[in-house]
Image (cartoon, grey):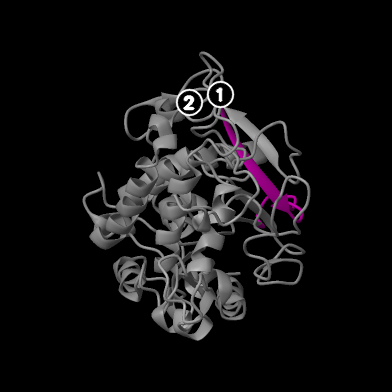
Amino acid sequence: MPEQYRYNPAPYPVSGGWNTDEPAGHRQFHTFATDRPFSLEGGQSLRNVTIAYETWGTLNADASNAILVCHAWTGDSHVSGPAAKGHASPGWWEGVVGPGHAIDTNKYFVVCSNVLGGCQGSTGPASPHPDDGKPYALRFPVVTIRDMVRAQAHLADALGISNWRAVVGGSMGGMQALEWAITFPTRVRALVAIATCAEASPQQIAWGAIGRRALLMDPAYNNGDYYDAANDGGPWTGLSVARMIAQVTFRTDVKFNEKFGRRLADRNFNSDGIDLFSRFEVEGYLDHHGDRLTRRFDANSYLYIGKAMDLHDVGRGRGGISEALGRIKAPTLTVSIDSDILYPAYQQEKIQSHISNRDQRNRHAVIESVEGHDGFLIEVTAISREISQFLSETN
């Protein structure tokens, strides 16, 4: 690879996931399946499962004020709060969750957990296998969104939360929120599903497949057994390219034109940029996002979580989508970003149209934005307005 494509001269870690040698930060840990295995939807099982989570606010006496916030593909439990030891960046939904915000931590007890299969403290491919202490790598079983939710249910039980005041999530977080309301309909009192779907579409699967192929083609991936490599010896090239591909789907043509145009980031040998390795500013943007992910994520977790999203289908084994969504008892807010090309608005409209509980508080909201799919993270004011109003309506 030409040196021009190395975004950052600092060595890349073999895995950017959190490990127990680092400060835990605000993380707490719940371990279960110590006496008997945790059975997975695919037929395999896990033992000694740990879920990393964070909490904000105070759980009231009857545990009726708890809200579960579910993260997206490369998110983690740090939904709110500053960057600090153990947390490389500020909360991923800062401005939506926190004191005085829409999900008000002065009022609600907020929980966010790292998903099963993740790499920020929860059991995943980089975790030690209980048989030999070496990383699972590709020995880790395939997990689904339902498995993630059932693991969260173990956490809820341990926290003494019999039902959630609300379950809220965007993108893959919205998939989890839907599964919560379908799998445990009496444990969810309000549901917020943003920029998500009831089943992964062929195009969504296609984008994921391209990214996975880029990662698997990296020779340093070594069939998933890269954890013993030295710094810079892991599959950072493949993981960064996979992230760059995904990043294109997260934004819009309008936003790219507005932010970058055709401006050059650098010029080699020619003032007009007519050179094989001259780069446009948009390329630098993609390089930046690829670099950031390789420093905070694990390549195997990226593959496993991406596959869980591809497998997402609330109707599987339930008689179809309509039958599955018909199980939802909670009043439901669905939210679309009108410029979202990855999770188009019709998918959230479809969810709302199949909810049959006849709750008058069910509604669908559309947020106008040029940001694309990432609008669910960026359009803090608009997202907060919808969530705040809905929580007030379902109080």
Regarding residue 375, the answer to whether it shows in the image is: no
Q: Quadrant of the C terminus?
A: bottom right
Q: In this orientation, which residue lies closer to the viewer: 167 or 257?
A: 257
Within 10 Å of disc 1 (Cα), the crowding (few <14, some 14-19, many 20+) is: some
Q: CA distance from mark 2 to mark 1?
A: 6 Å
Give, as a single range, the part of the protein colored magenta. Answer: 48-65
Residue carrying label 2: 136
Q: Residue at x 56, y 54 (%)?
A: 291
Q: Is residue 181 above or below residue 26?
A: below
Residue furthest front in the image: 269
Asked whether 64 falls inside the magenta stretch, the response is: yes
Q: Is residue 278 above or below residue 187?
A: below
Mark drawn on residue 303: none
Image location of residue 231, percent across then percent down? 60, 36
Residue type at mark 1? Pro
Residue furthest left in the image: 319
Image location of residue 59, percent across then percent down? 73, 51
Q: Left of 386 or right of it: where is 237?
A: left
Regarding residue 395, the answer to whether it shows in the image is: yes
Q: Is residue 205 above or below residue 220?
A: below
Q: Residue at x 68, y 48 (%)?
A: 54
Asked whether 21 falls inside the magenta stretch, the response is: no
Asked whether disc 2 touches disc 1, contact meaning CB atoms under 8 Å apart, the reply is: yes
Residue carrying label 1: 128
